[in-house]
Amino acid sequence: MIDSLNGEVLTIGLDHAVIECSGVGYRFLATPQTLGRLTRGESARVMTSMVVKDDGVTLYGFGDADAREMFHKLQNVSGLGPKLALASLSVFDPGELSSHIAAGDAKTIQSIPGVGKKMAERIALELKDKVEAFVPAGDAPAAAEATGANKGSSLISEQVVEALVGLGFQERSARPVVDALVEEQPEEDASALLRQALSQLGKK
């Protein structure tokens, strides 16, 4: 099992990145927040989770151990797979999500694309006693600093748009909303921007 990657970032896509380790490039899927912390050509370390299914092997990358652990816990919920687990972490960081789960706030959990009322209630019920140890990662200031530059903001914008498209929204509808949010809040991180964009698009 591949537990982590530590090497040069070769490429950063809209929903994935490739890190080279000992001459081998490893492609992994990740949230916009995780991808926003990477810089092409620089060394980086990401925690990983390898999901093996009949149709192939997929590697998922995370900025910290809390995000990976929450990814694993979410998949313990009946009917919730890795794709929806990653979508959940694109909307909420582990600390926020654990707070909503511990409070039994199914309505807020339901704001995750692909999570209906029954699934939200199931998440809150099945994980309520399993997330109390989670605490916020506490690295928001670093993330804001990393995304403050114009180049970083542009990359974050593309990543958030792609995440929205992957969640079922049309690019022509998502892009204007994301661009406006990035212009208004250039130091905001990808996770927060995605939440705001989802909120606005959901009202249309």
Image (cartoon, helix red, strand yellow):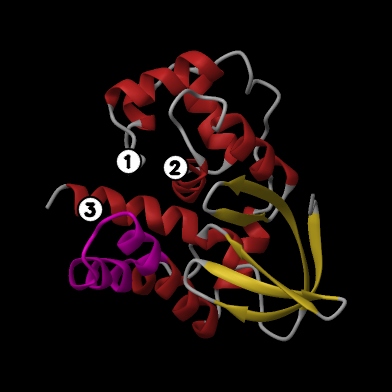
The residue lying toward the viewer, choosing from 146 and 41, is 41
Magenta region, residue range: 160-181
Q: Residue at x 52, y 53 (%)?
A: 55
State the image coordinates of residue 73 (x, y, percent, origin top left). Answer: 61, 30
Q: In the rendered image, is residue 87 in sight? A: yes
Alpha-carbon span between mark 1 and mark 2: 7 Å
Q: How many marks?
A: 3
Dot 1 and dot 2 residues touching (CB under 8 Å): yes
Determine the secondary structure under disc 1. Answer: loop
| Among numbered discs 1 and 2, the one appearing first in the sequence | 2
| Residue identifier under label 2 | 84
Q: On the picture, is 140 further left or further right than 84?
A: right
Queried whether the magenta region covers residue 169, the answer comes back as yes
Alpha-carbon span between mark 1 and mark 3: 16 Å
Q: On the picture, is 156 further left or further right than 171?
A: right
Nearer mark to the viewer, of 3 and 2: 2
Instruction: Name the magenta segment's main secondary structure.
Output: helix
Q: Residues within 10 Å of mark 1 (few under 14, many from 20)?
A: some
Determine whether 60 is above or below 88 in the image. below
